[in-house]
């Protein structure tokens, strides 16, 4: 198998197909395109659970993982309350690596009032870089029914913030910056690196849900195109997206051109996708809270998920492994 996430086909065939038991407490189980599970535990509250994994530079691994987990929980209608930490280090990994990850997680957990419930740390010879996995639980009101699969034909698709912003910031923050200086000014690179400051979408999701939005998706690691596909797949709906309406910064475009990356397929932490009957109204309400947002397309009948760029049409495909 290829290195990375398993494909959607393998997920359906070898994972989801084999899960048959469902208790009376299960509200939301595993499904293609959905990123959380939900259990009924009381008269007024449900428990929501999610898991994220990241790998790479330890100085930023903790921040990326924490925000992705908190964003997933918020887009599911809940709030992250507790998390378990699993950290795998490569042979030769140092204790300082553990401290770097933990310092960032402890700082963020205190800022967001999230309990660290426990975890596991191990050195594995097969790894070439650290891998961090966070498993989170939180609570949601029973009447808060929001998920990726809530799209309906005729809905507008609304996107917040800017595509690929966090992914471009990570590229600038890597050790490649010395090479980037030969093409870009220091001020340009500093501006591109600011994407790490807008990785949270928890407040944005809470605001959208308070306005009655029931179809919501945190974009995260799979990029805007990947999240759009998964939202359509979870909803069993088609999508028609106008590429020129997707908000993106020039810095992101140029950084991605330098590395030959597609900016709509790289990480977009802090970005939300929402489905709503009145996209213009939702954008207006977001603007009242100084949240950048735009209507980028519509939900259609059938299964076709396309991106229109002038006279050109491309089909969205399942996110790459």
Image (cartoon, rainbow, N blue to C red):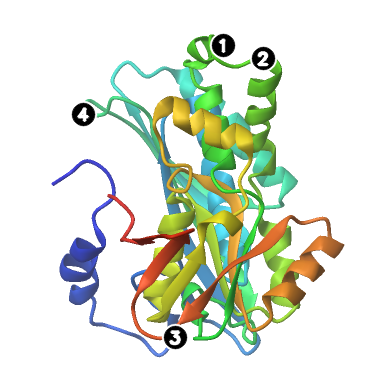
Q: CA distance from mark 2 to mark 3?
A: 54 Å
- Where residue 273 appears, as percent x and y from the top left, is 57, 64
Residue at the outermost right position: 288
Q: Residue at x 45, y 70 (%)?
A: 231
> Which badge, 1 or 3, is on the more N-terminal residue?
3
> Which badge, 4 or 2, is on the more N-terminal residue?
4
Q: Quadrant of residue 213?
A: bottom right
Q: Please name the residue that numbered disc 1 is placed on.
A: 181
Q: Please name the residue that numbered disc 4 is placed on.
A: 126
> Which badge, 4 or 1, is on the more N-terminal residue?
4
Q: Please name the residue that numbered disc 3 is placed on.
A: 25
Q: Secondary structure at mark 4?
A: loop
Q: Secondary structure at mark 3?
A: loop
Relative to 153, does residue 262 appear above or below in the rendering?
above
Q: Residue at x 54, y 73 (%)?
A: 47
Q: Please name the residue that numbered disc 2 is placed on.
A: 186
> Which badge, 2 or 3, is on the more N-terminal residue?
3
Relative to 227, does residue 4 appear above or below in the rendering?
above
Q: Residue at x 21, y 29 (%)?
A: 126
Q: CA distance from mark 4 to mark 1?
A: 34 Å
């Amino acid at each position: 198998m290829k290195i990375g996430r398993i494909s959607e086909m393998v997920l359906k065939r070898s994972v989801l197909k084999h899960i048959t038991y469902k208790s009376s407490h299960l509200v939301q189980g595993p499904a293609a395109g959905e990123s959380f599970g939900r259990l009924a535990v009381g008269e007024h509250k449900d428990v929501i659970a999610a898991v994220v994994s990241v790998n790479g530079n330890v100085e930023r691994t903790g921040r990326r993982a924490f925000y992705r987990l908190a964003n997933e929980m918020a887009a599911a209608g809940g709030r992250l309350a507790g998390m378990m930490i699993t950290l795998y280090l490569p042979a030769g990994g140092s204790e300082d690596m553990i401290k770097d990850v933990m310092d960032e997680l402890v700082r963020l957990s205190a800022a967001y009032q999230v309990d660290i419930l426990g975890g596991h740390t191990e050195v594995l010879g097969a790894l070439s870089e650290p891998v961090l996995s966070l498993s989170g639980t939180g609570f949601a009101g029973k009447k808060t029914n929001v998920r990726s699969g809530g799209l309906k034909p005729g809905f507008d698709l609304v996107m917040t913030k800017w595509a690929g912003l966090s992914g471009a910031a990570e590229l600038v923050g890597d050790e490649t910056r010395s090479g980037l200086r030969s093409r870009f000014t220091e001020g340009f690179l500093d501006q591109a690196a600011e994407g790490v400051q807008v990785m949270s979408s928890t407040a944005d999701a809470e605001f959208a849900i308070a306005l009655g939005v029931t179809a919501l998706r945190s974009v995260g690691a799979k990029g805007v195109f990947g999240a759009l596909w998964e939202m359509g797949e979870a909803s069993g709906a088609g999508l028609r997206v106008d590429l020129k309406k997707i908000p993106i910064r020039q810095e992101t475009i140029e950084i991605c051109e330098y590395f030959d990356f597609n900016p709509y397929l790289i990480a977009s932490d802090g970005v939300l996708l929402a489905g709503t009957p009145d996209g213009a109204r939702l954008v207006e309400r977001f603007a009242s809270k100084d949240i950048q947002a735009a209507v980028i397309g519509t939900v259609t009948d059938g299964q076709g998920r396309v991106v229109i760029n002038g006279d050109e049409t491309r089909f969205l495909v399942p996110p790459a492994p």
